[in-house]
Image (cartoon, rainbow, N blue to C red):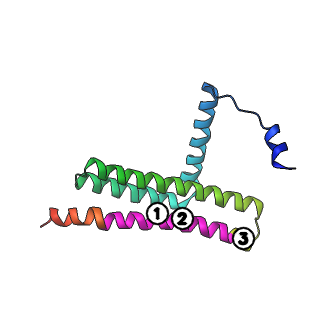
Amino acid sequence: MNMESKDKKRTRKKLGFHSILSILGNSMNGFYNYCKYERSAIIYFLSAIIILILSFICQLTAMEWMIVLFLLLVTLAVELLNTAIEAVCDLVSPEFHPLVKVAKDSGSAATGALSLALLLLFFFLFLPKLIEMFE
């Protein structure tokens, strides 16, 4: 089947109040599953709480708050995408497969890269402010 025939069969979905509620419900289900089944959720939320407490203690500027919140939300989004990748991999290949390993490891690497960004945020944003507070 070529792309043209696929496009012809697709119909535009109506966007009404009920479909918006359905979208929000699906989003909440995905978030709930992440919180319930992923051990990385505990690490993420503990880290986020510590970062938010430090943000209040250090009295961040509005721009610094935007950077912190942006990084926290992007990290959460990548964690959720990684969870989706892992679920699809487990569905299509319950047995070990080298390509499934590549997909899962790549998703993990993406979350690791954002964890590094949060660590750099600590060293460049919070640490100087904390040192200044205790001098």
- According to the image, label 3 marks what residue? 99
Q: Position of residue 116 (x, y in %)?
A: 43, 68
- Residue 64: x and y in percent read 30, 53
Lower position in the chain sequence, tag 1 or tag 3:
3
Per the image, the residue denoted by label 2 is 110
Q: Name the amino acid, label 2.
A: Ala
Residue most extreme to the left: 135
Distance, label 1 to label 3, CA atoms, is 23 Å
Give the residue type that dot 1 points to: Leu
Label located before the other in sequence (3 or 2):
3
Tell me, yes or no, whether the two marked residues, 1 and 3, touch with CB atoms within 8 Å: no
Secondary structure mostly seen in magenta is helix
Mark 2 nearby-residue class (10 Å; few <14, some 14–19, many ≥20): some
Binning the other alpha carbons within 10 Å of mark 1 as few (below 14), some (14 to 19) or many (20 upward) gives: some
- Residue at x 59%, y 50% (from the top left corner): 33
Total numbered badges shown on the rendered structure:
3
Give the labeled residue for mark 1. Answer: 114
Question: Residue at coordinates 57% horizontally, 53% vertically from top-left?
Answer: 34
Q: Nearer the viewer, residue 72 or 57?
A: 72
Please tell me whether residue 70 is drawn above or below residue 21 in the rendered image: below
As for residue 21 lying within the magenta part, the answer is no
Report the residue at 25% width, 50% height from top.
61
Residue 38, how many percent across, how many down? 56, 58
Q: Secondary structure at mark 2?
A: helix
Asked if the residues shown at circle 1 and circle 2 are in contact, with their CB atoms under 8 angstroms apart, the answer is yes
Was residue 105 drawn as part of the magenta stretch in this picture? yes
- Residue that lies at the very extreme toward the bottom in this rendered image: 98
Residue bounds of the magenta highlight: 101-123
Whether pointer 3 and pointer 2 mark residues with C-beta atoms closer than 8 Å, the reply is: no
Nearest the eye: 42 or 132: 132
- Which element carries disc 3, helix, strand or loop? helix
Q: Residues within 10 Å of mark 3 (few under 14, many from 20)?
A: few
